[in-house]
């Protein structure tokens, strides 16, 4: 084992050791996290060596070259960290890097939060195998929580490790691959403990604007605006559903009636989506899979996390004259504010967009 790998693994074990010994479930969760990260680190191979290796598949080489171009662009053009992240490759032999488990009470949209020594408190737990996520979902379900599991193709260790390009990322199209690199490097650029909405919205804006500039630099037109409009319209349906559910949960209805009305609101969301799809979208079923799955409070949580302050960061970028260095500096100023002041500042930016 190389010295670098030993040092990285030492950090992982130190992180687990710093946690309170609350329960066997807690210990089991962190044990799988350490094992999963260790296996990922052990699977890494330098991309430059792979590109020079005649035994490596030509199709894989082409995808890795694209990833390296996007990675170089991220630092040179978007002001993102210039480090060893995404300069190595790991094949995990599975479709997702991790499976994130979200949970929320039956009559609340506030997620169950989990706290970690370095990342702070977040609205999900990540599992390196789906079976572990499902087992925890069953345990939480027995306690009355709504749960939802989503597979993700990449995640950031916030600079603790040199995150590699994963096989799970290469199944995406060129835009999605580049966008994922921009998003995860943005988390390394700026991350605020205990503020999911800030972190994901910041990274989401960097991803979105970075992709536009990446395509322009390659002589390509802007990303598909029709798809972007469909995404905005779908998210508007989700937001409207969340607001109706929020009002319902604030009422004093008895649980049986509240449960029935919750079911009705979810069915209304499905019906509204089908009308939009079959009407304005001309049958384009971008979100058919999600709509057909289980929809509950936990399934609605990620939409609030990833989109809440996108407009605020877009306004901040314009105010800094589309200058990435100035934008990152201004975002860091927001990050230094206390939570209430930061939220007020983001609200003002959203109003100015």
Image (spheres, grey):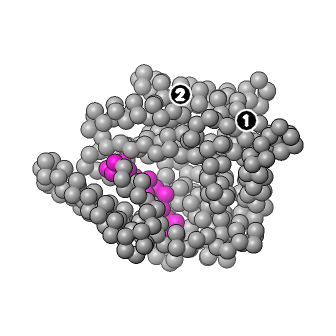
Question: Camera-side residue: 27 or 53?
Answer: 53
Q: Residues within 10 Å of mark 2 (few under 14, many from 20)?
A: some
Question: Is 213 left, or right, of 105 in this rendering?
Answer: right
Question: Camera-side residue: 60 or 165?
Answer: 60
Question: Is 141 left, or right, of 35 in this rendering?
Answer: left
**Is residue 175 positioned above or below 185 on the image?**
below
Residue indicated by mark 1:
44
Q: Which residues are magenta?
A: 294-311
Image location of residue 29, percent across then percent down: 48, 29
Image location of residue 39, percent across then percent down: 64, 29
**Is residue 315 positioned above or below 62 on the image?**
below
Residue indicated by mark 2:
32
Q: Decide whether residue 320 is among the magenta residues.
A: no
Considering the numbered disc 1 on the image, is that residue within a helix, a strand or a loop?
Answer: loop
- For the point 42% across and 21% down, the residue is 24
Image location of residue 173, percent across then percent down: 63, 57
- For the point 49% across and 64% down, the residue is 309
Image location of residue 301, percent across then percent down: 40, 52
Tell which tag, 2 or 1, sits nearer the viewer: 1
């Amino acid at each position: 084992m190389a010295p670098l790998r030993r040092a990285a693994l030492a950090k992982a074990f130190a992180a687990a050791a710093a946690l309170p010994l609350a329960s066997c479930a807690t210990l089991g969760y962190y044990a799988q996290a350490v094992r999963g990260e260790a296996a990922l680190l052990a699977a890494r191979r330098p991309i430059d060596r792979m590109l020079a290796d005649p035994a490596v598949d030509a199709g894989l080489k082409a995808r890795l070259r694209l990833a390296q171009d996007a990675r170089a662009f991220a630092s040179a053009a978007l002001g993102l960290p210039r480090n060893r992240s995404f300069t190595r490759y790991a094949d995990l032999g599975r479709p997702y890097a991790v499976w994130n488990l979200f949970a929320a009470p039956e009559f609340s949209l506030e997620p169950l939060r989990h706290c970690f020594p370095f990342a702070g408190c977040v609205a999900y737990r990540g599992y390196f195998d789906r079976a572990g996520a499902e087992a925890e979902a069953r345990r939480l379900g027995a306690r009355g929580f709504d749960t939802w599991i989503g597979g993700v193709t990449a995640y950031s260790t916030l600079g603790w490790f040199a995150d590699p390009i994963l096989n799970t990322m290469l199944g995406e199209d060129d835009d999605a691959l580049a966008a994922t690199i921009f998003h995860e490097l943005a988390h390394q650029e700026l991350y605020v403990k205990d503020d999911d909405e800030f972190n994901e919205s910041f990274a989401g804006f960097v991803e979105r604007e970075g992709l536009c500039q990446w395509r322009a630099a390659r002589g390509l037109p802007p990303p598909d605006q029709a798809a972007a409009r469909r995404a905005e319209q779908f998210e508007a349906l989700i937001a409207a559903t969340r607001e109706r559910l929020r009002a319902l949960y604030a009422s004093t209805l008895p649980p049986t009636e509240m449960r029935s009305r919750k079911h009705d609101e979810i069915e209304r969301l499905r019906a509204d989506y089908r009308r939009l799809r079959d009407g304005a979208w001309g049958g384009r079923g971008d979100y058919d899979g999600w709509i057909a799955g289980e929809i509950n409070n936990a399934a609605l949580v990620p939409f609030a996390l990833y989109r809440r302050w996108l407009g605020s960061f877009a306004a901040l970028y314009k105010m800094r004259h589309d200058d990435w260095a100035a934008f990152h500096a201004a975002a860091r100023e927001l990050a230094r504010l206390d939570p209430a002041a930061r939220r007020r500042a983001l609200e003002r930016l959203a109003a100015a967009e």
